[in-house]
């Protein structure tokens, strides 16, 4: 796993931990939010990659600073490392969808402190910064949430925006600034098409999410797989997703 900066302003930082080369399992991006010496890990990853994730975390923040964790939904690539994190630090507060609490306990760590996120969403404090927990239900899980940082204008979008990219890919679509990179976006988004058509089941859920997200001021959109969208590529992605037919496994 490699660590790279996403946003920085004083003591307020976002980091992405990503894997460009390994293909033992589906690649996953893990994000760290740091504020005032406290850190949160967003979608901390699966059991298989925990040692690499923890080593990458230690490159950017003291592991003892991790006080919060956010789990967008129940998938193993999102949260099966939960008992290992808990074994290292049983004081971490886990912000998880209320609907999935009982299922997430099947990974272990029955003593972990869970804070259930209601269907309408909520918030999570990291240091002095408040992060909004934004509903993204059925994209693709029945209870699903994303994270918005209004100060940094960074939006963690979970599986929305994800792309299954070849080894050696850049961790930004068309570079950190996005800019006039329509060609780079068009090349990248082909790696996202099947993922969204097959894993996103509901056009109504897609529309609800897009309407909600278009009201936010987002400069950086961070998916859990693939590369990060910045600048004009954020709107390019929203426009592309808006026009995409999803739920394609159902015969018509």
Image: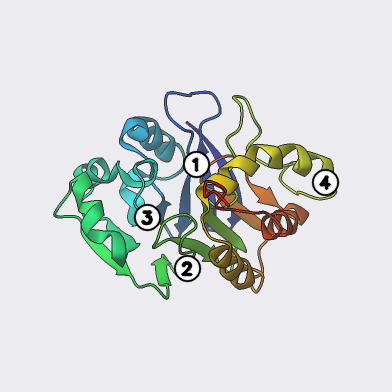
Mark 2 / mark 1, whichever is N-terminal: 1
Q: On screen, 245 above or below 53? A: below
Residues under labels 1 and 3: Cα distance? Answer: 13 Å
- Tell whether 212 sits left or right of 32: right
Marks 1 and 3, the one that precedes in the sequence = 1
Which residue occupies 42% across, 45% down?
A: 61
Q: Nearer the viewer, mark 3 or mark 2?
A: 2
Nearest-to-viewer mark from 2 and 1: 2
Residue on which disc 4 sits: 182
Marks 4 and 3, the one that precedes in the sequence: 3
The residue sitting at 46% across, 64% down in the picture is: 137
Dot 2: few (<14), some (14–19), or many (≥20) neighbours within 10 Å? many
Tags 4 and 3 in contact by the CB under 8 Å rule? no
Do labels 2 and 4 touch, CB within 8 Å?
no
Along the viewing direction, whichever of 79 and 42 lies nearer the viewer: 79
Quadrant of res 48: top left
Q: Name the residue tied to disc 2.
A: 135
Q: Which residue is mark 3?
A: 71
Closer mark to the observer between disc 1 and disc 4: 4
Residue located beneath label 1 in the image: 29
């Amino acid at each position: 796993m490699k660590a790279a900066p996403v946003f920085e302003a004083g003591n307020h930082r976002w980091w992405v931990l990503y894997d460009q080369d390994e293909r033992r399992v589906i690649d996953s991006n893990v994000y760290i939010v740091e504020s005032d010496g406290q850190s949160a890990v967003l979608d901390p990853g699966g059991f298989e990659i925990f040692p690499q994730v923890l080593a990458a975390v230690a490159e950017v923040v003291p592991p003892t600073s991790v006080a919060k964790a956010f789990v967008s939904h129940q998938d193993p690539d999102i949260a099966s490392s939960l008992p290992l994190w808990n074994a290292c630090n049983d004081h971490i507060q886990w912000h998880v969808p209320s609907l999935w609490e009982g299922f997430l306990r099947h990974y272990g760590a029955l003593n972990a402190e869970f804070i259930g996120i209601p269907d309408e969403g909520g918030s999570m404090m990291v240091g002095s910064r408040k992060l909004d927990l934004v509903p993204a239900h059925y994209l693709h899980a029945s209870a699903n949430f994303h994270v918005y940082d209004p100060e940094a204008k960074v939006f963690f979008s979970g599986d929305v925006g994800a792309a299954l990219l070849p080894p050696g890919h850049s961790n930004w679509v068309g570079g950190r600034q996005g800019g006039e990179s329509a060609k780079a976006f068009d090349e990248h988004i082909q790696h996202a098409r099947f993922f969204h058509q097959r894993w996103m089941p509901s056009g109504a859920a897609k529309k609800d999410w897009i309407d909600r997200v278009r009201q936010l001021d987002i400069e950086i959109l961070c998916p859990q797989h693939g590369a990060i969208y910045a600048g004009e590529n954020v709107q390019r992605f929203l426009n592309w997703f808006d026009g995409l037919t999803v739920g394609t496994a159902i015969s018509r």
